[in-house]
Amino acid sequence: MTNNNLETAVLSSSNEICKDNKKTECCIKAIIFDLGNVVIPYDLQKSIEWMRKIIFFKKVKDDDIENAVSPKKMELIRKYQKGMPRKEFFNEIEKRSKIPFAKNFSMLAEQTTYAMFSDMNPEMERLIKGLKGNYPLAVLSNITEPHKEFVLQKYPLRELFDYLFFSCEVGMRKPEKEIFYFALDKMNVKPEEAVFIDDYKRNVDAAKEIGINALLFNSTPELKSKFYELGICP
């Protein structure tokens, strides 16, 4: 079976589920999306490669760079995502890692942002547009200030979403439960009235712990199917 035929079969089955679910009152009143690799594809490895080529001396090993910038390995990234100024972040990276930076690292660092992000998935964009107007839609993203500025310029996020919750603006980040409560309060919904989609299991688990209907993202067709099961029909 081709990918197109498979998607058609999934959607046909999901439409029947949706019709049945619509017979009962749907309790979902808001939908919250993670940004990176849910709404917008990105590749951290591309950013690391740019750093190797243009920010650091070429003799620096890729593993050293990844250790310096990986969110999984450095508390510093978490502070950056909560609003730490860019210059302070890179100064601290240089000091901690002892990786020498190029003199114009601040300007070049922004170029790594461009390398990281890809075009928005058209299928996901159509899904969001189909939901728009029927549900309040939000983005909830762990993101740094330079990345935030870039994605707001490149992608129509303000047109697609009613709320944009960025960790660098609110001083909280996933999987901290406070950021979920913050988003729910701003959207004026209860946890059980919201759906949250993320590609990291730890964030999904944290949302579930406070009662949010949280879904682990793998693909857009699968997400559509999960939406239909919840009675959410674009």
Image: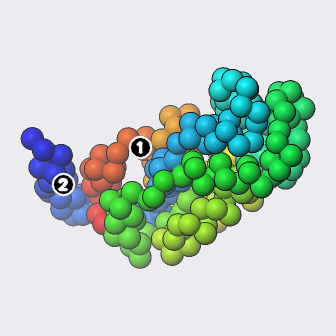
Residue 226 placement (x, y as % from top left) = 31, 48
Residue 15 placement (x, y as % from top left) = 17, 58
Position of the C terminus, as image quadrant, is bottom left
Give me the residue at 24% from left, 63% from top. Answer: 22
Residue 24 placement (x, y as % from top left) = 26, 61
Residue linked to disc 2: 11
Amino acid bearing label 2: Leu
Relative to 25, does residue 67 appear above or below in the rendering? above
Seen from the viewer's position, the closer of residues 194 and 145 is 145
Amino acid bearing label 1: Phe
Seen from the viewer's position, the closer of residues 132 and 87 is 87
Judged from the image, the secondary structure of the residue bearing numbered disc 1 is loop
Extreme left residue here? 1
Characterize the local packing of mark 2: few (<14), some (14-19) or many (20 or more) Cα atoms within 10 angstroms.
Answer: some
Residue linked to disc 1: 217
- Counting residues from the start of the chain, the first of labels 2 and 1 encountered is 2
Give me the residue at 47% from left, 50% from top. Answer: 41
Residue 177 appears left or right of 133: right
Judged from the image, the secondary structure of the residue bearing numbered disc 2 is helix
Seen from the viewer's position, the closer of residues 186 and 12 is 12
Residue 118 appears left or right of 231: right
Query: In which image quadrant can residue 232 be found?
Result: bottom left
Relative to 160, does residue 57 appear above or below in the rendering? above
